[in-house]
Every structure is written in C-alpha cells, then in structure tokens.
Image (cartoon, helix red, strand yellow):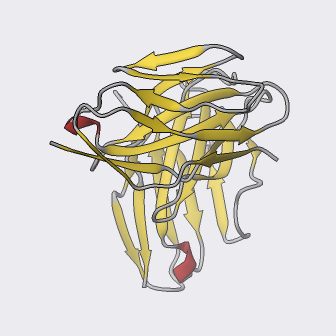
Amino acid sequence: GAGVSQSPRYKVAKRGQDVALRCDPISGHVSLFWYQQALGQGPEFLTYFQNEAQLDKSGLPSDRFFAERPEGSVSTLKIQRTQQEDSAVYLCASSKGQGAVEKLFFGSGTQLSVL
Amino acid sequence: GNSVTQMEGPVTLSEEAFLTINCTYTATGYPSLFWYVQYPGEGLQLLLKATKADDKGSNKGFEATYRKETTSFHLEKGSVQVSDSAVYFCALRGGNAGKSTFGDGTTLTVKP
C-alpha cells in the first residue's frame, strides 16, 4: 500500500477484555516498530521487528502485551486483560532498512480506550 | 539510555514570526537526529533529519543543525505560517539502528 495502515482506528474495550491491533507496513519495509503514545506525550517504544524476528521487546510494559509478525509483513499487537492504564494511542511505524539514518513512516494509530 | 528533551510548549506565534524549538539529547555513540511533525488529524511524518555532526537538515523552510558539542538539534524557521500549526517531535535513532527515542512534543499555534 501507499502508507502504513493500522486498524481499527478506534477501539473501546471493557476492563479485562483482550484486544488485537493490526499494522500493515509499507510493502518491502524490513523494520517495524510499535509505540505507545499517551495524551500530551511523545511516542514510547514498545517493540521492534526486523522481518519476522522480534529483536527488541524491552518496552513492553507487562507480560499482558504480546506482538508478532509471523511472515515479516503484517504485525499484530495483542493486549490481554486490558487495564485502564492501557488507554493510549498505539502507533505502528516501518522503515525500509535497519540503519540509523532510516526515517520512520508512521500509521495514523489506534486509539484504545479501556473503560 | 538515550533521551531527548524538548522545549515545553505550547508555543503561540503570529504569522511571519521567527520560530525556535529547542531540543537536546543524550545518547551513546553517533545517533541520527530527526524532527517529526504531526498536523491536526494526521499521523507523524518526517520533517527533516541530520545524520552526522554539523549536518544541517532542511525542509519547507525549517532548518536544524546537528551540534555534537552542545548535543542539540534546535528547529528554526524564519517566517511561520498558519499552516505550520502542528505538534513537533524531536527524535534520535541510535547507532545500533534499533528503536527511536522521542521528545514529548511541542505544540505550535500560528495566528493570522
């Protein structure tokens, strides 16, 4: 596709529900990142994939958070037993290569509200 | 670990005013530095970047110079327009080419 696509755009969940957020990166992009953005703050790193390999998951806040990218393209971020503190915008970004000079292309995000 | 500190906002300017948004960073090695912009209702997009010391990134009249001696990457524009109203994020991507680290963003409002 032309850009990074995320779905759903908005998600409302009851506390304790499981949610799955999808990211479709730009075709051919090797690197894929998930970020969490709280209101009024910058994106906070969650996890990073290079192709299908999850190279860094140090930002995942708890074992309720799980991400996968099984075929090196589409990625899913799953949050189990959602809590109110999980409410945030979840951003997906991809880059063509893996070098430090590579810019990120961002999706529009999924706004998660946990009631 | 790496960190980015941005000038706190919000910033409100009149059209044609001069803009500076300060950004300083802490990083190991030789990171690349970026400014991303988020226009209302849109996703983050790259505004400009610099990949080594003394490089100047520029785009749409905005400029920023990678200053290693002061660990800074301040964003400047000589004459802002109403259409520049957005949230601006300073970021760095480390030499190990993994995650990017972002500042908290600065909201700019330009009034006609």
Q: Is residue B14 above or below residue A31?
A: below
For the residue pair A73 and A114, the one nearer the viewer reads as: A114
The quarter of the rendered structure image containing the C terminus of chain B is: top left
Q: Position of residue A2 (x, y in %)?
A: 34, 27
User: A68 or B36: nearer the eye?
Assistant: B36
What is the tally of numbered marks visible in this picture? 0
Q: Choose between B47 and B5: the one closer to the eye.
A: B5
Q: Residue at x 28, y 43 (%)?
A: B85
Is residue A94 visible in the rendered image? The answer is yes
x, y (%) of residue A4?
A: 41, 37
Q: Is residue B95 above or below residue A114?
A: above
Does residue A53 appear in this view? no
Look at 53% across and 74% down and name the residue there. Answer: A18
Residue located farthest toward the top when viewing the structure as drawn: B55
Residue A71, x across and y down, in percent: 60, 37
| Residue that appears at 73% across and 29% down | B97
Q: Residue at x 50, y 81 (%)?
A: A17
Quadrant assignment, res B60: top left
Image x and y of residue B48, in percent: 48, 24
Q: Quadrant of residue B2?
A: top right
